[in-house]
Amino acid sequence: MKYLDAFRDGAVARKLVEKLHARVADYAGQMTFMEVCGTHTMAISQHGIRSLLPEQIRLISGPGCPVCVTPVDYVDHAVALARLPEVIIATFGDMIRVPGSSSSLQREQARGAGVRIVYSPLDALALAQKHPDKKIVFLGVGFETTAPTIAGAVLTAQRQGLSNFFVLGANKTIPIPMAVLASDPELQVSGYLCPAHVSAIIGPQAYAPLVAQQKVPCVITGFEPLDMLQGIDMLATQVLEGQPRVETQYSRIVRPEGNPQARAVLEQVFIPCDTPWRGIGVIPGSGLCFREEFAAFDAARQIPVDVETPREHPGCLCGEILKGKVRPADCPLFRTICTPEDPVGACMVSSEGTCAAEYKYGI
Ligand code: SF4
């Protein structure tokens, strides 16, 4: 905690809050800032950031929880693969509890299907080495932070000549959906708290087209309370000055060039493609698909399986929550029949989900 304490200092927080209140005191309008990253969503709730803000500033949550934005038909596809006796699904923990149309990976696991929780794609590679008679399918869910590690695992599998390692791909990129939401007149996004980890890979320049086209301020912000208060203050300053730009509050981690090595690995294996987002629909160019030369690792192409027609719970508002249009409390199922122990939608499952954050910490 030694190094975190400096970013949680109450006296400094009070000064930042006073500064922010004074800065917007004469502002007659409303500033709506969207935090894009699920980790921000959780941290904002955990530290009660909303309660510290002046009434002119409203925070809304965006589509930055990777498990939440993965649509139900992907879960159904994973469930269908898990039912094949020759397949072992390897996945990060949150995914196994996400409800599909009629089942989940957790239920399939309880029925005896091969479903393993792993902590990195390399763990899935180790499974493939250990079980040469099985097909190991890693669930490729996540943004630009996770995609390079998956690409690295694919390159390693290729080098090792592993023919039983596959990825069911659903990786996505962040700046394009931000542009889509910035152009939504219902939302009126005044600025973005840009994701910290993703930005460490893609670098600040990745948001330049968004700022140029949509004239929306962007501040790459860290996860500690003082980071977020400072990031919000920087956004408010940009709004008041009327000069949208990309700024980096989280400069202790995010370099101007991002991480070119990680991007090179990612681009070696994946190309941009159209992909569906829960609640938003298909966004052109916002997904990452295998390049043709890596098609042998693509579970969707290499392991044919029938997938049921997707159905979502009609009462779940997760899609609207991911667009920042409603809060969890607007959902009649929130805290009644939808709880972290028995989630109805993905937003209640994930440790980065908006519903899970508000269930745990309140607004
Ligand atoms: Fe969906 Fe549950 Fe959130 Fe309601 S509370 S939107 S049912 S995840």
Image: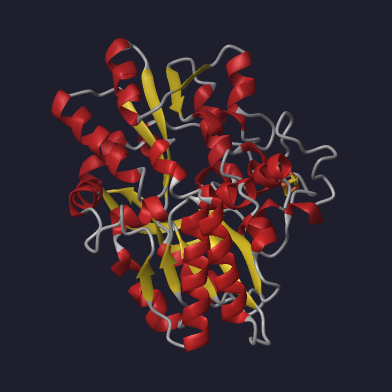
Image quarter of the N terminus = top left
- Please tell me which residue is depicted at 30% across the width and 11% down the height of the picture: 130
How many marks overall?
A: 0
Residue 53 pos. (x, y %): 65, 66
- Please tell me which residue is depicted at 72% across the width and 53% down the height of the picture: 363
Residue 278 or residue 204, whichever sits in front:
204
Q: Quadrant of residue 221?
A: bottom left
Residue 98 or residue 18, whichever sits in front:
18
- Please tell me which residue is depicted at 34% across the width and 44% down the height of the picture: 147
Residue 58 or residue 71, whichever sits in front:
58
Q: Quadrant of residue 258?
A: bottom left
Q: Quadrant of residue 123?
A: top left
Residue 226 pos. (x, y %): 49, 56
- Please tell me which residue is depicted at 75% across the width and 44% down the height of the picture: 313
356 vs 110: above or below = below
104 vs 197: above or below = above
348 displayed left or right of 333: left
Residue 17 is at least partly visible in this image: yes
**Colour theme:** secondary structure
355 vs 222: above or below = above
Residue 67 or residue 135, whichever sits in front:
67
Residue 311 is at least partly visible in this image: no
Residue 30 pos. (x, y %): 66, 80
Residue 40 pos. (x, y %): 53, 52
Farthest residue to the left: give it.
Answer: 159
Farthest residue to the front: give it.
Answer: 11
